[in-house]
Amino acid sequence: MNTDTRIKNVPVVGPGGRAKLASPRAKRRGRFDILPYALVTPLALFIISLALIPAVFTIVASFFKDQALNPPVRFNGFENFVNLFNDAGVLSSMGNTVIYVLVGVILSTVLAVFFAVILRKKFLGRSLLIAVLILPWALPGVVNGIIWSNIWDSNTGLVNSLLTSMHLIDTYQVFLGQNKFMTILAIEMVQVWQITPLSTLLVLASMQNIPDELYEAASLDGGSPWKVFWSVTLPLTAPGITIAMVQAVIATLNIFDQPYILNGAASTGASLTMQTYFISFQNLDFGQGYALSLIITIVTLVLSLGILKLVYRPVEY
Amino acid sequence: MNRRPHWFRWFGVAFIVIWSLVPVYWALNTSLQTDAQVSSKPSNYVPPTPTLSNYLALLTGEGETAAAIRQSSINILIECTLATVITVVLATLAAYAFARMKFRGGKILFYAVLATMAFPAYTTLIPIYRILSTFGLVNTYTGIVLVYVSGFLPLATWILYNYMSSLPLAIEEAGTMDGASRMKILWHIVIPLALPGIISTAIITFLFAWGQFLFPLVLSSDLSTQPLTVVIAALQGRHVVPFSLLSAAGIIAIAVPAAIALILNKYIVSGLLAGSVK
């Protein structure tokens, strides 16, 4: 395995920000240069037909009544949105999703900062540890759900077995599907397990940009490791923490696989994305499905921008 | 920093190892036990008599479940491989144009591609389903691969764009002086130099494709196209399937991505960082 595992920040240059290779022929004769268009056409076709058109479609169609079992399609203004906010299932899922986001963003960020502190300096076996760290990120969410359902299980689960062996509980407990907060916490742990590796890498990359001299100066000033962490490490890692939190917001707001596997359609854990799926593909009410997708998208964007504004600060050394 | 006590690092290292590996170990442990052994209280922390019977039942068994696992394993391999190859080829071409050529509309397209990354993927689930059904592509490999490619192209293009932009221009300019066409330069100079970035992109794309669930859940309706993830979820939905068998199915489903993560993690790390610096 590679011994130098220091994560380097990749330089980023905006388009046009760098010298370009001009076509020799186009330059000489001022002729239209077709090559770049040929190179980007496949990408453009994919993005337009399967990302931009669907996105516009979602926005427009969320203002239409579009029910497969109740044609025809017609404009109905904000009716889909009003109906969503009167739907008990949707409202309960909104509450659930708020908890998913809060628990997921806080836990994954705290763990990521902790892991990054551990991994900041080189030590023997560090690259192996990074390989181990990455593992949960690489596994399918569905399978992670199955793995963890076996951990939380009320009859044969690992947690129950361990807690009983340690005499912390007398009888096996039910973690999923009874208490709402416990259910969501147990499900969100699965997602945190999966998203923390990426958060850690982002925080770590930022942390490694901090010059060692800053640490040395802070230590010489008599700062305890804890104090140095609060006054040097944490503030200077803000850019990485911001990106990590934004990724966590996007992931947690759109959580689907884990609650679907661990708790099914039960209201104790159903997320907003699950509601979108049920509304669209079980009730076949596409109009409301579009509207809910649109709401989730807007909340995702607003929250991401909010975090950028609150947490991000440019760092100069 | 140097004065941070050693116990802190070792506590952290132990924490990361336990945190990352125990859930996977638990699935492995369960998959090597019989149904009866799994139900013992407290649980067996190591398999008392390790058995491969669960794996054999799934991989060589004759029942409906085993057939489904085998067919969906083939499906997921085909879908992920095709999606990865197409994504990487198209992203390489586009990234080269964005990184090295100036052309009218290039910037707008570039930012439009990046903007799609800011939207949650599931926003477009319903319209994509309807577009595919209009063209009769629901429940086909083509449909699923097209959707995967469209989903992963922006990130792939972004990673490769960053990678190619950071390559020194001098070698390519020398190629131009020698009269090589730009496609020749791409093929003989840029692609070999960008190979680590291309490998990173391919690995990340493949892992993303392997992890897909909601899209194939909606876009494929039967075993002819359903990937392993969808079949395993359906298996889990039927509560009669014991954890021993379910865990074996889970281990089969994570074998490929786990091997990739453990062996090729260097490429994953560099690719993810190149893709997330926004």
Image: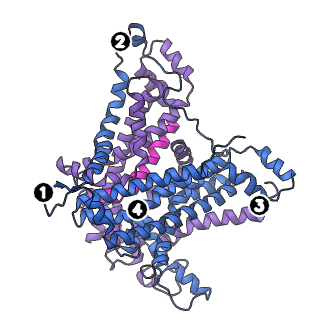
- State the purple chain: B
Q: Nearer the viewer, mark 2 or mark 4?
A: 2
Report which quarter residue B117 is drawn in.
top left
CA gap, disc 2 to disc 1? 52 Å
Q: Amino acid at mark 4?
A: Ala
- Residue under pointer 2: A31
> Residue A83: where, in percent of width, then height?
28, 66
Instruction: Return the disc, 3 or 2, that comes first in the chain's sequence.
Output: 2
Q: Residues within 10 Å of mark 4 (few under 14, many from 20)?
A: many
Label 1: state its secondary structure.
Answer: loop
* Sequence-first tag of 3 and 1: 1
Q: Would you say residue B215 sits in the magenta stretch?
A: yes
Residue B54 seen anywhere in this rendered image of the structure: no
Q: Residues within 10 Å of mark 2 (few under 14, many from 20)?
A: few
Give the number of the disc on residue B25. none
Q: Which residue is mark 4?
A: B253
What residue does disc 3 label? A226
> Quick one: A281 or A159, which is closer to the camera?
A281
Is residue A82 visible to us here? yes
Direction from residue A311 to residue A293 in the image, left or right: left
